[in-house]
Amino acid sequence: MTSNAMNDHEKAPINTESLRLHLQRIRALATLLDNAFRVPGTNFRIGWDNIIGLIPGVGDVTTGIASASIVGYAMRLGVRKRVLARMLANLGADVTIGAIPLIGDLFDAAFKSNMRNVALLERELARRLDS
C-alpha cells in the first residue's frame, strides 16, 4: 500500500527511540518559545514568542514560522487530521491575535500555543503507541 492510500488508522510504524529524541527537541523548542524565562517576582513564565512578538510587523510572523515547525513535524508523523486542525487553530490564534498590539502580547503570554501543540502531539502519539 502506498503512503497516499494510508488512512488515519494505518500509519507507518514508529521508531520509539528516534521519536523520543525528536519529541525532546520539539519540547525544547516549545519551551524556548513559550516558557524560557520566569517573570521576576512571579511564577509566570514567558518565552521568545512573547519577546520577539513585541517587534511590530515581523515579530509574530517570525515566531509563527518557528511554531509552524511543530505542526510540520506532526504532519510528517501522520497525526490524525482532527489533531492537525486543532494544532493549526492554536497556531492561527497565536499569530492572528498575537499581531494585535498589547492585547496580542498578553494573549500570547497566557495562551502558550506551542506548549498546547506539543501536548496535543504527545497525546496523539501515546494513543497510537497504545493501540
Image (tube, rainbow, N blue to C red):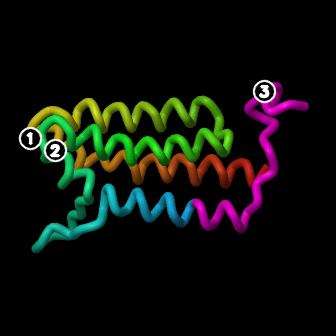
Q: Residue furthest bottom?
A: 41
Report the Cα–Cα distance between label 2 and label 1: 5 Å
Q: Tell me the tag on residue 16.
A: none
The disc, 3 or 2, on the residue closer to the chain's N-terminal end is: 3
Give the residue drawn at x 19%, y 46%.
53
Q: Which disc number belongs to residue 4? A: 3
User: In the rendered structure, which amino acid carries the disc numbered 2?
Assistant: Asp
The residue that appears at 53% across and 41% down in the rendered structure is 72
Residue 27 sits above or below residue 11 on the image: below
Residue bounds of the magenta highlight: 1-22
| Neighbourhood count class around disc 2 (C-alpha, 10 Å): few under 14, some 14–19, many 20 upward | many
Residue closest to the eye, 48 or 111: 48
The secondary element bearing badge 1 is classed as: loop
> Image height check: is 7 above or below 64?
above
Q: Looking at the picture, does residue 22 appear above or below residue 53?
A: below
3 or 2: mark nearer the eye? 3
Q: Is residue 10 magenta?
A: yes
Within 10 Å of disc 1 (Cα), the crowding (few <14, some 14-19, many 20+) is few
Check disc 3 and report its element: helix, strand or loop.
helix
Give the number of the disc on residue 102: 1
Gap between marks 3 and 1, in whole Å? 44 Å
Specify the farthest residue to the right.
1
Mark 3 or mark 1: which comes first in sequence?
A: 3
Q: Position of residue 73 (x, y in %)?
A: 57, 46
Q: Is the C-beta separation of discs 3 and 1 under 8 Å?
A: no
Question: Toward the viewer: 53 or 46?
Answer: 53
Q: Is residue 86 left or right of residue 3?
A: left
Residue found 21% across the figure and 43% down from its top: 59
Q: Which mark is residue 105?
A: 2
- The answer to which of 59 and 128 lies nearer the viewer is 59
How far across and down, in percent of the image, does residue 26 sit? 50, 58
Q: In which quadrant will I find the N terminus?
A: top right
